[in-house]
Image (tube, rainbow, N blue to C red):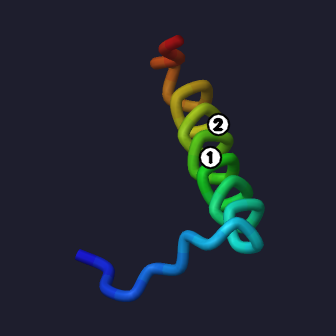
Amino acid sequence: MVKNFDLRPENKSELWKVEFLIHALGDSYAHVHGEARH
């Protein structure tokens, strides 16, 4: 568990970018392995 994780409004854009990258990489991995799921 991450302690002191900063979720103040000025940091939510960064969190969004991290989540976006995770989903984008996950989709790319799925496509490469022929397991694209929606």
Report the front residue among 23 and 11: 11
Where 32 sits versus 21, above or below? above
Report the front residue among 11 and 26: 11
The residue identified by callout 2 is: 28
Distance between mark 2 and mark 1 Cα atoms: 5 Å
Neighbours of disc 2 within 10 Å: few (<14), some (14-19), many (20+): some
SS under mark 2: helix
The amino acid sitting under disc 1 is Leu
The answer to which image quadrant residue 4 occupies is bottom left
- The residue depicted at 68 percent of the width and 47 percent of the height is 20
Give coordinates of residue 18: x percent, y percent: 64, 61
- The residue depicted at 53 percent of the width and 17 percent of the height is 36
Q: Residue furthest left?
A: 1
The residue identified by callout 1 is: 25
Report the front residue among 24 and 8: 8
Give coordinates of residue 15: x percent, y percent: 63, 62
Quadrant containing the N terminus in the rendered view: bottom left
Where 21 sits versus 30, above or below? below
SS under mark 1: helix
- The residue depicted at 62 percent of the width and 46 percent of the height is 25
Where 5 sits versus 21, above or below? below
Neighbours of disc 1 within 10 Å: few (<14), some (14-19), many (20+): few
Question: Is 2 positioned to the left or the right of 37 in the image?
Answer: left
- The residue depicted at 68 percent of the width and 62 percent of the height is 12
The amino acid sitting under disc 2 is Ser
Report the front residue among 9 and 38: 9
Give coordinates of residue 8: x percent, y percent: 62, 72
Q: Residue furthest bottom?
A: 4
Q: Residue furthest front?
A: 9
Question: Is 9 positioned to the left or the right of 32 in the image?
Answer: right
The answer to the question of whether label 2 and label 1 lie on touching residues, with beta carbons closer than 8 A, is yes
